[in-house]
Amino acid sequence: MKIGGNRKQKKRLNADIYVFAALALISFILLFFSTLSFVVNFRNVGLSMFSGIRGGIYGVSSQIERTVNSIQELAVLQREYVELTARITRYEQLERTSAEIRQENYRLREQLGFSEQIRYRHIPAEIIGRDPDNLFSSFVINKGKRNGLNSNMAVIAFQDGIQALVGKVVQSGQFESLVMPVYDVSSFVPARFASSRYDGLVEGQGNSEYPLLMRLISKRARDKINFGDVVVSSGIGSSGSSGIYPPEINIGRVSRILYKEYETSMEVELESAIDFSRLEYVFVIDTVRLDTDAAAENESED
């Protein structure tokens, strides 16, 4: 009895389901053809869903695009930075070069002004060679025989507003010459004190860092010599003849007085008037005065 009752209940439930499905289908059809509101709502739901998906895709793509653009802008900025850095470096080099050129022009104008004041025939020259180890005190200049240079011609320079003696030419080639400076151990320059006019002989000690020595000074000059006194070339050669070095060329200043009672003469140490470590330009001269040449020209015209 129970089994038969269960079957009847299942059949009744299935029938109710079929009836419900049929009624729902009929309601859907009626609703579709009457107002179409369900379809519209369905479309709205689909639109909203796809709009969200589209918004997400757009946001991600926009972020990726911004990232790519940022990377490209960073690369452009990096390239511009490198170019600007290189340009600044070039400008700094040009500024340094310009400053060096201005400084060199100033030095050359200074030398030109000094050249116009020299009373002797002279040939301007530039030092182009030095001994880096100071084993040899001589140096090389860029003028030679083709420029009128010969051995035993005096060499002077203009430095810090002072006309000073550098040395003499000891060897002359066609295009270059060798100069022996006054601080060489083989250099001997007849000299005198600019104020007291006592004579002596200036010798070198082989190095520009060592003081020059002025020997053979009369002991009578002891009370006439003071620290800082200027010593100049005397212009006197052997046997009283005209020497290699023209007169009144600055050599140095007294830095120390050496006096011994038992010696027949006295000595002094001199601080050189030339700073040889920064000497660049010199003038090679002879002892023929320009005014003598002018007088000769006037006589020839008469």
Image (tube, rainbow, N blue to C red):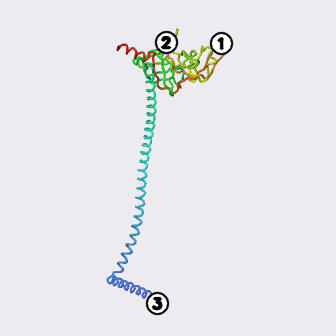
Residue 83 image-quadrant placement: top left
Outermost residue on the right side: it is 261
Element at label 1: loop
Q: How many tags in the picture?
A: 3
Outermost residue on the bottom side: it is 1
- Which one is in front in this view, the residue at disc 1 or the one at disc 2? 2
Q: Name the N-terminal-most of marks 3 and 1.
A: 3
Residue 138 image offset from top left, x and y in percent: 51, 20
- Which one is in front in this view, the residue at disc 3 or the one at disc 1? 1
Question: Dot 3, how many residues are within 10 Å of its Cα: few (below 14), some (14-19), or many (20+)?
Answer: few
Say which amino acid is labelled 1: Glu
Outermost residue on the front side: it is 302
Residue 129 image offset from top left, x and y in percent: 47, 23
Whether residue 198 sits left or right of residue 98 in the image: it is right
Say which amino acid is labelled 3: Gly
Q: CA distance from mark 1 to mark 2?
A: 29 Å
Say which amino acid is labelled 2: Ser
Which residue in the structure is indicated by mark 1?
A: 263
Residue 22 image offset from top left, x and y in percent: 37, 85
Q: Name the N-terminal-most of marks 3 and 2.
A: 3
Q: Is residue 67 above or below residue 173?
A: below
Q: What residue is drawn where x is 35% and y is 78%?
A: 40
Q: CA distance from mark 3 to mark 1?
A: 162 Å
Which residue in the structure is indicated by mark 3?
A: 5
